[in-house]
Each structure stands twice: as structure tokens, then as C-alpha cells.
Amino acid sequence: MATNKYISMSVIKRLPRYYRFLSNLKDDGISRISSKELSNRMGLTASQIRQDLNCFGGFGQQGYGYNVETLYEEIGKILGVDQGFKMILVGAGNLGRAIATHMSFQSRGFELIGIFDKNQAIAGEMIKNIPIRSINVLDDFCKENLPVVAALCIPSSESEEIVDQLVALGIKGFWNFTHFDILAKYPDVAVENVHLSDSIMTLSYQVMNTA
């Protein structure tokens, strides 16, 4: 499998979509598919699909197309869904609880091992068999358990201090639901920003401009 650290982020962001569509094809009992057939299902061009997959070695055979099971497994490896990266979640309010409760972390490459909040009143409550811990024990927990990824579901005003603390503790990636610009301060960590307000405003634009 050929990889290149300079692969466009736009290509990387399409990989989970390929993975999802291939999972559906597997569930439907489809064992092989051409780039043209896949393009019709995904709303991409066949050329775009071939270019994307060629960034990682191709995987297709001329005249045969793609083996669905093999391509699904290979994209899973590229995405690291088999890695089980240790992850913590900071902020057990409504959003944090919803994410911890409903997200299938394990099937997406992560193991949620800790949940933290500054509200002492909820310390000890359980979310999917994981106790909410006081933010005061964050240092000790990280030093003992060595998580590498953190999900941030806290107010932006509190984010910089927590991010400083987490980077010092060895966190290398952030699933960031705040509006704090982590990369501006720490350009060498991995960050995936999730701005729900931006997303719904984008939807507003699309609705407004739909004929």
C-alpha cells in the first residue's frame, strides 16, 4: 500500500465516505464494482474515484473493477480503524454526553477510556460504563493511561487552558467541537474541527438557493 504524507486533505476527507458506501455494498452482497458504478452511487466522477484511490496504490483491475471486500479493508487500514487509539472526552454536558453515548468509537479506530468535566456534582455518573471524572484528576489519569486523542466539548473560553494542559500530557490529536483555533498555537498536532453552527448555516445557504 503506497502512502504519501502530502496527499490532499480533500482526498483524505472523501475516504470515510468511500468506506461507508463500500460497507453498504458489502451488506447488499455486492462483491465487485466498477469505478463507473461506484461513481453513479456516490455522485463523483469515475475519474475522481480512480485518482483518489491511486494515491494509495489503486486497488482496481482493468476489466474487473474493485473487489468490494478488499477495497473496504484497505481503506479501513488507511483510515486506521483497526488502531484503537486511546481517547478521552472533555466536557460532559449535553453535547459531550450525546457523543459519548451514541458514537461507535471502536469501529472507527478509537477506544474511549475517560470522560472529564469541571462540574464536581456529576463526577461519578456513568456514561456507557465510563465514569465521569473531575477535571482535577486529568493529569494523573493521562500519565497513567496515556491517551493520544481528546474530544473537546467545552466552551471556547475554557479551551486554550485545557489544550495547553493536554498537549503537555502528550495528546497528539483533537476532535474539536469548540471554536478555539488549536492549530494556530499548536501546528504540529492533528485537529479535526466540528463546527455545528457553521454546518447549519451552510445548509441555510443551500436551502435559500435551491430552486
Image (cartoon, helix red, strand yellow):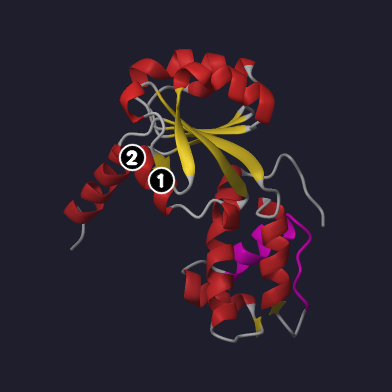
Residue that numbered label 2 is attached to: 95
Q: Secondary structure at mark 1?
A: helix
Q: Are marks 1 and 2 in contact (CB under 8 Å)?
A: yes
Q: Quadrant of the C terminus?
A: bottom left
**Residue 138 spot, x, y in % from top left:** 54, 21
- Image quadrant where residue 171 sits: top right
Magenta segment, which residues? 46-61
**Residue 168 spot, x, y in % from top left:** 63, 15
Q: Is residue 157 left or right of residue 82?
A: left
Q: Is residue 13 magenta?
A: no
- Label 2: how many Cα within 10 Å (few below 14, some 14–19, many 20+): some
Answer above or below: position of 96 versus 128.
above
Q: Secondary structure at mark 2?
A: helix
Residue at coordinates 41% horizontally, 41% vertically from top-left? 126
**Residue 114 spot, x, y in % from top left:** 53, 35
Q: Is residue 54 magenta?
A: yes
Q: Can you see residue 119?
A: no
Tell me which amino acid carries mark 2. Leu
Residue at coordinates 34% horizontally, 30% vertically from top-left? 122
- Label 1: how many Cα within 10 Å (few below 14, some 14–19, many 20+): some
Q: As rendered, which of 57 and 177 lies closer to the eye? A: 177
Residue that numbered label 1 is attached to: 99
Q: Can you see residue 139?
A: yes
Residue at coordinates 49% horizontally, 77% vertically from top-left? 40
